[in-house]
Image (spheres, coloured by chain):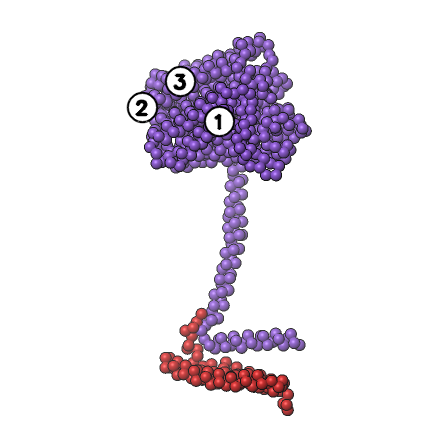
Amino acid sequence: MLPTYLTLMLLFPLLGGLACAVAGRKLPRALVEVLACATVWGSFACAVLAAAAYTGPQVITLTDWFASFDLSVPFSLYLDPLSLSMTVMIGFVCGLIHVYSVFYMREDEDYARYFALLNLFVFAMLTLVLGETLPLLYLGWEGVGFCSYLLIGFWYSDSENADAGRKAFITTRIGDVALMIALAWLFQLFGTLSITKVNGMGFLMPGSVITMLGILFLIAAMGKSAQMPLMVWLPDAMAGPTPVSAMIHAATMVTAGVYLLARLLPLIGSSQAALAAIAVTGGVTAFYGATCALAQRDLKRVLAYSTISQIGYMMLGVGAGAVTAATFHLLVHAFFKALLFLGAGCVIAAMHHEQDIYKMGGLRRSLPLTFWSFLAGAACLAGIPLTGGFFSKDSILLAVWLKGGVLYQALYLLGLLTALITAYYSFRLVFLVFAGGNGQVHRSSGLTVMELVLVPLAILGLLGGLLDLPAYLGGGYLSAFFEGLPAGDLLKVSHEQEIAMQILAGAMALLGLLTAYFRYGKGRADRMREAQAQPSVLISFLSQGWYFDKLYHLVLIRPYQACADFLWERVDRGVIDASVDGLGSGIGGAGRLLGRWSTGKVAVYLISFAAGGALILGYLAWLAL
Amino acid sequence: MSVPLSHVLIVASLMFAMGLGCVVAWRANVIMMLIGIEIMLNAVMLTFVGGSAHWGIADGQLFSLMLMALTSAEVSLALAMVVYLHRRKNTVNTDQFDSMKG
């Protein structure tokens, strides 16, 4: 039964997407909406059935895809705890986002394109997750990139949005080049592109090769998961509709990099250097994202930077070799970040598309359901003790600490500091948006349904900790589930130490909460006044994302433009076009010159004839002599 | 054969050159040009006859007979054209007839 479930899981969103794309404009709106939602929920149902029928890791070959010489790539899927948990999460979160989208996009005329892309996005992500061969994974990898490009630039008539889409596409493509190189190299080294086979053959290669492969995969993940230094696209990607942000930035695309590294950890995990590079990237990005989120004024950009930061945590976990912890955080993060984005969508819809958090306030009373759900999401994000985010973040920090060594201990401290900042900015958001005075909102009929979607996500986010409770509370379900994985690792740690570290992390979160309360809860009016003034140097440094955009503009884009201008003006137009044009006009001129010879006068022809005859005669005479 | 071929050829080429000179020099007059062309054709005929006598083959003689027929036909046509042209433009100067300009 398993192959049927997996095939249907992939086929549902694909067919839904195709149907919407081909016939969506002809069909009645309600039908398209129902179709788009039903296919994703069908896919989720298949994922649940597959989970129920799951007995152990299994490779399912559906059919041959292509084979030539010694390269053969079958169309095969791999179901193991990692991919199974991902598919269930993707199906569920994307299903909710689809339902939410129906109401969020009520006003938009272009629903057919929207739902087609959304469905295709789910299909591509599931292909990525389930693919057993790397080319199949790459297909899904590119598919989500393509769909995200179209969805981020969904309102393409505004050139800023279209630019954001292009930026996302091009930046992630830099990482994809590294992935392509890694795939070609892997095939050259091992003669196969099957993930399960490659994972078991790492020991055949010298450490330096594995390190290089690890770095290449890391670069690929940097692009897709918006890690330093390829993170610049993600804040701009907020240009798309909010449900799209929730989908791309919470549940699917940006986690693909983490998933790739977790998937290939048995191969690259033997290289300490590669692991360290992954961990450092993750740790630094987590810190970077959190600091940037501190100074943002746009509601969605705060969440975007927080996504960068949280994915950084996951990378840190993978870098510490803790696939379980990283996946745990990935799953819980998907719930609470989708919740935060969708909550933000409710706020934005109710505020007439106002996104500046300094212009909000008082929504606690006018949007109570959104408020409580958003509060739950923020508590998870901040890692307030006993929420899902607390346990998952803590298990990553714990794994980093247990890894030992100066580097990892420094990263642990950085992670702890980031946790403090995270708690601070999460509650800054809550206080600015929901606390305080006037809360005039505009309620539409769809808003209630949109708010109801938040509830299951809030429950899942808050109770997400149950997925993988720490050992002293009876041990985790996820840890046991992942135990059989090649890289699945049970952390061996005494209960006292674990409790001590969780108290430390919890204290950090509460400290951040308290600071935010005093600064933005009690001193809200002062902050509002300050926001009117010119921002300080530090604030603008942080709100501009450490000026990375400007740096790239200076280092990459400006020289590129200068080079392109030179090649266009001087080389293309100055040399190539000019020489071709010159040749043409030269021949034309010569033709006109010769044309003047044909005067129509018999005499001229006769003289020409005589002269020609004389020339021929002269030539013959010269030959004869 | 009392006269060597080279002499015949020299005379023929002189005649041809003179005919050509006539055509080029008197181009203001179509009739003079026709006369020049006739002289050039005569030079060609002389060459044919000389060659025929030299190699003892009758082909050249035949060609000269055909040329005579050709020239008489040509002259009758050409004179008719001269009359026609003169009627149109009231002149026989060839430089006036340039409507076939390329």
Answer yes or no: is residue A581 visible: yes
Q: Amino acid at mark 2?
A: Ser
Sequence-earlier tag: 2 or 1: 1
Q: Label 1: state its secondary structure.
A: helix
Quadrant housing residue A364 = top left
- Mark-to-mark CA distance, 1 and 3: 32 Å
Please tell me the colour of chain B.
red
Splitting the image into 4 quarters, where does residue A100 fall? top left
Residue A247 image-quadrant placement: top left
Tag 1 subunit: A
Relative to residue A394, is residue B34 depicted above or below? below
Mark 2, residue position: A445
The residue labelled by disc 1 is A4
Pointer 3 residue: A455
Q: Amino acid at mark 1?
A: Thr
Tags 3 and 2 on a common chain: yes
Of the residues under marks 3 and 2, which one precedes in the sequence? 2
Q: Position of residue A207 (x, y in %)?
A: 67, 27
Mark 1 against mark 3, which lies toward the viewer?
Answer: 1
